[in-house]
Image (cartoon, grey):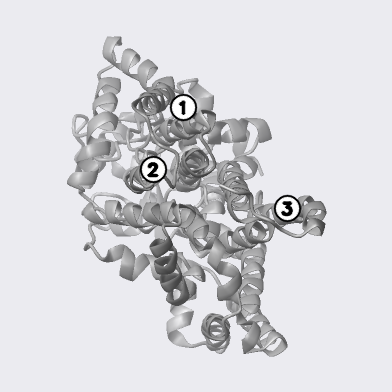
Amino acid sequence: MPRPAYPRHLNHSYPWAWLALMLFALVLLGLGIGLRDPWPADEPRFALNALEMLKTGQFWFPHRGGEPYPDKPPLFMWASALSIAITGSVRLGFLLPSLFAALGTLALVVDLTRRLYGQRIALLSGLALLTTLQFVIQAKAAQIDMLLTFFTTLGAYGLLRHALLGPTRRWWLIGFSAMGLGIITKGVGFLPLLLLPAWFWFAWRGQATRITWKDLGLGMAALFGAIALWGVPMILVATFGDDPSLTAYRDNILFKQTGERYADSWNHLEPWYYYLVKVLPWAWMPLVLALPWAIPGWWRHARRGDARLLLPLSGVILIIVFFSLSPGKRGVYTLPTTPLLVLALAPLLPDILNKRIFNWLGTGALALLGGSLLIAGLLGAFGLPALATLAERYDIVPWAWWILLGVAAAGLLFWLRPRRGMLALPLWLALFWLSWSTWGYVLQDEARSPRRMMQLVVSITGDDAWLALPNFDEEFLLQSRQPSVHFGDQTPSPDQFRRVFAWLQETPGQRWMISEHRRIDDYSCIDLSQAHDLGHQNSDDWWLIPGSAVVSCEGDANAAPLFVAPTTLGTRYLAP
């Protein structure tokens, strides 16, 4: 395939433009690191997994407060543990894996686009990726999916280098190895294999590198070899060890969390059209606004048999179909489609960006977003009861921030006019993310992290007092500054309280528990005159209750297992 031609002056300026793009991405995606703690729902869990690895040295089997955590493979937890260990701080380290994964994904998309279409389109593709809502959201969140997307993008990059710019067996094997690492990050790391049906078609037509049985065999060997880096030691330790909890972990992670979770999901149940109607319209914003022109463009390229565009597009379609067929669905599952969508849109971007109606759509989207924030901010500032109640519930008063963003949107619309709506919208999104990562983090952190509440608890109980957390959420165990116990993530609530009552009654002068007001209201046996009101945190009101307050409650020491978190699990890494 001939190398794309571009002006000679761009040859010299491109490295500087690429560097500027990556530095902008680093600032946009990295700003705010160190300003907040891990937030629910997932971030505290993975930080807890990482801290426990560092505390106990048990890296093959992730744990959460002493209890095996079989829901996800450990590669993301390894990355988190390494980042926290290097920085010496949860706040500094827990977001780094997602940041570096996002920068790596961006670099892969830009490089492949440059090789296929030239330098100008490569830079446009990078900016397009950086404006996409779901991509930036996940780059600024400590969840598994951004690291998964890096590995699936690297897998697709290796396969597409071999298919469209090859043959290059090295990149073919790198792609399969990346898929193996993706699988031990999250089970669906094999998603780039969905490129193969279209690839076989184009190879048969002579428009892509042919795939041999030898290539497939070597590729699968590389994939399983990467999985074996963790899978083999885990299986051997669980099989030949004497810990039944590790055997249960092995069976859960290999069977229940893979095929059973896909075919017969037990949560996040949604209809087949969930992604098309409820997720992609916002997750792909503003790229989704280009679809009225992209779809006819894709059709024209399909009639010409352009494998460069149609291969990544086939991956987007088949990934959406794959996840739509499972009854269990979450919006974040579609994140790996975003880099492939950008690759499929890349050659069409210069023409689409010049479309007048496309820019008007960008203007409309910005007017809607900015106008909504401005109106909500003004109504909140003037004390609208519904917004005042919402602010009180979440303990956040964002009115000035929202008003500023609304005014900024109005200013950009006035300055750039509707004919440049697709310049105004990305500029406003950049401003939004920069303010979110600073002002927004400061506004939300105290409401979403129980750091101060757990400091208050230890100031009342003392450093050496034991604390029980029935029906615990990971953020409380993560921020605990004293020896802590819990009673199992899957144990029913009544069983947990019978167990905690028995545990407290063993040494009531040295043991305490925290629980929500609404749960304690069910137990009239508790003497609340001895309890300490901890106030409002994470949308609930909390009591700190000493063991002496539950001596008349009926306990059952056999009702549920007791898990002991490694002592002072995060004290070293949680210091402000």
Disc 3 crowd, CA 10 A, few/some/many (<14, 14-19, 20+): some
Mark 3, residue position:
18
Residue 260 x, y percent position in the rendering: 20, 40
Q: Earlier in the sequence, mark 1 or mark 2?
A: 2
Which dot, 1 or 3, sits closer to the camera?
3
Do residues under tags 1 and 3 come within 8 Å of each other at their CB atoms? no
| Position above or below: 151 against 177 | below
Question: Going by the picture, which residue comes out furthest to the front?
Answer: 206
Residue 531 x, y percent position in the rendering: 40, 51
Q: Earlier in the sequence, mark 2 or mark 3?
A: 3
> Which amino acid type corresponds to the residue marked 1 in the rendered image?
Pro
Count of marks placed on residues: 3
**CA gap, disc 1 and disc 3:** 46 Å
Q: Is residue 435 left or right of residue 513?
A: right
Q: Earlier in the sequence, mark 1 or mark 3?
A: 3
Q: Is residue 42 left or right of residue 558?
A: right
Residue 437 circle label: none
Mark 1, residue position:
566
Kindly state the secondary structure of the residue where label 2 is placed.
helix
**CA gap, disc 2 and disc 3:** 32 Å
Kindly state the secondary structure of the residue where label 3 is placed.
helix
> Which amino acid type corresponds to the residue marked 3 in the rendered image?
Trp
561 or 174: which is nearer to us?
Answer: 174
Residue 333 appears in the picture as rendered: no
| Residue plotted at (43% across, 66% down) | 298
Mark 2, residue position:
203
If the image is split into quadrants, where does the C terminus sit?
top right
Residue 258 x, y percent position in the rendering: 27, 37
Disc 1 crowd, CA 10 A, few/some/many (<14, 14-19, 20+): some
Which dot, 1 or 2, sits closer to the camera?
2
Residue 376 appears in the picture as rendered: yes
Kindly state the secondary structure of the residue where label 1 is placed.
loop
